[in-house]
Amino acid sequence: MTVGEAILAHPSMRALLAGAIDYAGLFPPSSLDLPTVVANYHAYRNGADAWSLGRLVVPVARLGAVVEAAAPLWNAPGGAPGPWRVSALVGHDAVADAAEIGAVNEELDGRAVIDSVESRAATPAQVQSLAGLFAGMEHFVEVPLAVDLPPLLAAVREIGAHAKMRTGGVTSDAIPAPRDVARFLRACADAGVAFKATAGLHHPLRGEYRLTYEPGSPRGTMFGYLNVFLAASQAHGGAPVEVLVNTLEGRSHAMIGITDEEIRWEGGRASTASLTLMRERFALAFGSCSFREPLDDLETLHAG
């Protein structure tokens, strides 16, 4: 058994990552072609780590093409049970996109289901304009981080949606400051708003990494998904911003201890039971253009 496999076998990591990774292979830096993304998602659903796989993230404009490419796989024998779960990324015309999502869902006939949408809003008024458009689906509203968050998150709560934060990108200036991420986590917990994260969470711990897969790609200081989710567990438990910042900035592999009963780190610890509750109620998912990299990079850690 490899180090990564041993880490993933711990119930604490199962609690942290169960259904957590929304696969967004169409998006940078992977930017894979649609047939490859569809084939990958099918393979991941049938793989040993399918327990950690979440939804397939697709722009509304490409939903029809995804349905066409995936249909042969839905009809093939031996596939994983249950429908594909899709999260639709809404564009500038949310009203038109809502109608398109409804039309595609009717065509899917149970083979897949668009049960989540992801939109953007920068002001409470923009959030309110989305009210009622996506009834019956989980709705994540991406908000800017370096702003006054409580009014925005109050509006998100009022329309029955969740929040979404962007934690990275293909340039260094797309990566937010740890304090802004900490403020977002604290504000979401205070508002009683669950969230997902997206972009840049390819590695377990914060560090200097290549920003893209291109040869000679520049490097940047990226967040680790363990840092973000463990800071989320602290926010869910009431910890202040300064404590969250310390967890978000942790880089040392020695800071992490993973056992069946808990995950501990410099400045905190979370039981398997508390991680399960936090994932169910607060930190719902993170989007990644690679499903394998976040899991395979656990090889860089040492089992607790």
Image: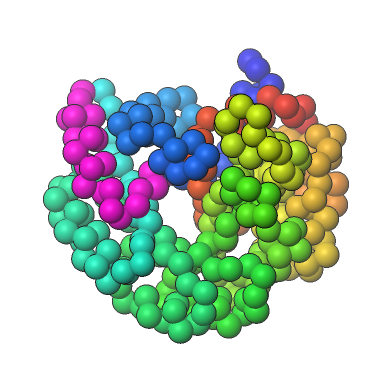
211, 138: nearer the viewer: 211
Locate the N terminus and report the quarter of the image it occupies.
top right
Does residue 62 sit above or below 211 in this rendering? below
196, 214: nearer the viewer: 214
In the rendering, at what x and y percent does residue 211 appear? Answer: 63, 40
- Identify the residue shown where x is 77% and y is 27%: 302
In the rendering, at what x and y percent does residue 232 appear? Answer: 67, 57
Q: Name the main secondary structure of what is drawn in magenta.
A: helix
- Identify the residue shown where x is 41% and y is 34%: 32
- Identify the residue shown where x is 57% and y is 30%: 214
Locate the C terminus and report the quarter of the image it occupies.
top right
Q: Is residue 172 left or right of residue 37?
A: right
Query: Magenta stretch containing residue 69, yes or no?
Result: yes
Does residue 34 sit above or below 6 in this rendering? below
Does residue 248 sit above or below 243 in this rendering? above
Residues rendered magenta in the picture = 53-77
Q: Is residue 293 left or right of residue 178?
A: left
* Identity of the residue furthest to the top in this view: 1
